[in-house]
Image (spheres, grey):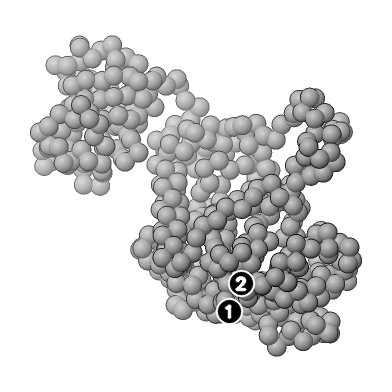
Amino acid sequence: MERTYIEDAGAHVGETILCKGWIDVRRDQGKLVFFDFRDMTGYIQGVILPNRAAEMAEAVKDARAETVVEVVGIINKRPERNVQTDKQNGDIEFEITGLTILNKAEVLPFEVNTDTKEINEETRLKHRYLDLRSARMQRNMRKRDQVQKFIRDYLHDEKFIEVETPILTKSTPEGARDYVVPSRLYPGNFYALPQSPQQYKQLLMTAGIERYFQFAKCMRDEDGRGDRQPEFTQLDMEMSFVDREAVMQLNEKLLIAIVQQLFPHKRIQQMPFPRISYKDAMEQYDNDRPDIREDKNDADLLAFCWVVDFPFFESTSKSDNPDAQGEWTYTHNPFSRPIEEHMESLMNKENVGDILTTQYDICLNGFEIGGGSIRNHSFEALSKVFELLGHSIETIESDFGHMLQAFKVGTPPHGGIAWGFDRLMMLLLDEANIREVMAFPKTGEGRDPMMNAPSTISDKQVEELHIVVKKPKQ
Ligand code: ASP
């Protein structure tokens, strides 16, 4: 017999069907044994009637919650008075005629037929494969996939293509510490894991891709902070021949379409999204990701806004950027282009603190969910930025020579943006932190209690990598 998915059971009233899945709940009520079965499409209640109890006794004995089963039974309409309108398949019942255990489940470290939020998070992460079985986590994973599919389709219709960029790469100046990977073949040399695909996506513009996007893993070695993860997902985009307006318009339309199509119960406070200058945001809200919600008690209110006109440089004395070398450091992205009116100041290295960048950030309910800029695609102008940042000619050549070189061989004007995709999903799914929308996140302190990472490696591996491990301080 072919498998019927639980969501389709209602179409088989009066027929015998075969379902496969898990026992969600078992309830023994006198001579009747009730089960709620679950597969990836939903839930159905089944019952073993007393006349079949004897023949199924053996299988039923071990059929505790989370056991994997194959169930054959008849789909019956429920009498009117027993219909549960608030439940999936609440109008039918599955009269079990055969139950086969495909794999037993031991007693679980926690129950998964709850929302699991109340359970100790370390325990949830240690047994994440179980935690993900809960209805809320299933919803989060499936909704995340729907949004990703929607974005992929939408961007393809807009002539974008998805291009994968390397994970083993070279340090990029994104403002955080790099994760590094020692090279076995090149003793004493290291790859860095990308903090973002920034340089690759710009080089794809040189390469004539014109419209690029990628769901990109980004790695930043920052101190654990509740809502930060060592690795996270960006929706990364770059476009050639665009101005700031074009990038903002496209992203705004995409965000609106996601909400309207996939989260229709949510209300967008204002469209087009309001735009606030960095200066006004700081003056009015005292931060650069203002929460402009009219009513902060309304869970379904989405208040998007753009923040623009950021200062390009800030004095290093005020910055915590570990890359800062000279008197000035960049606020967002060294590859950004100043606004047109301030290009001359950059070229003359005048009024540096007043130069505004084309950076635009998109904020939602007080969170920055994305940011990007029009890039500095001319060799001379980008060199000026690096000079202002205090890089010597040698370091410019060794760290960014490839970018400068590329800009001499026909790089079109371009710009882009990256969304913090986990953060957006967290807000759309009303979750309190990004770990709830990631399949296998690390703890707030950057550990994976399930895989037990990070962990030590063998002496042989250490040897091969030409590194020496210092004994950790006790
Ligand atoms: N790469 C930048 C970031 O990760 C975003 C961008 O400018 O496109 O913040």
Look at the picture and state if 129 lies above or below 383: above
Q: Is residue 430 visible?
A: no
Q: Which mark is residue 415?
A: 2
The x, y position of residue 433, in whole percent, is 56, 51
Marks 2 and 1 sit apart, C-alpha to C-alpha, by 7 Å
Q: Is residue 413 visible?
A: yes
Q: Are marks 2 and 1 in contact (CB under 8 Å)?
A: yes
On the rendered structure, is 245 left or right of 99?
A: right
Residue at image x 45%, y 20%?
106
In the displayed image of the protein, which residue is found farthest to the front? 409
On the rendered structure, is 367 left or right of 302?
A: right
Label 1, secondary structure: give it. loop
The x, y position of residue 442, in whole percent, is 62, 42
Look at the picture and state if 238 lies above or below 23: below
In the rendered image, the quadrant that contains the N terminus is: top left
Q: Looking at the rendering, which quadrant does residue 420 occupy? A: bottom right
The x, y position of residue 252, in whole percent, is 48, 72
Q: How many neighbours does mark 1 have within 10 angstroms: few (below 14), some (14-19), or many (20 or more)?
A: some
Residue at image x 71%, y 31%?
455
Q: Looking at the rendering, which quadrant does residue 316 occupy? A: bottom right
Which residue is label 1 attached to? 243
Three-letter amino acid code of the residue under disc 2: Gly
Three-letter amino acid code of the residue under disc 1: Asp
Residue at image x 79%, y 81%?
346
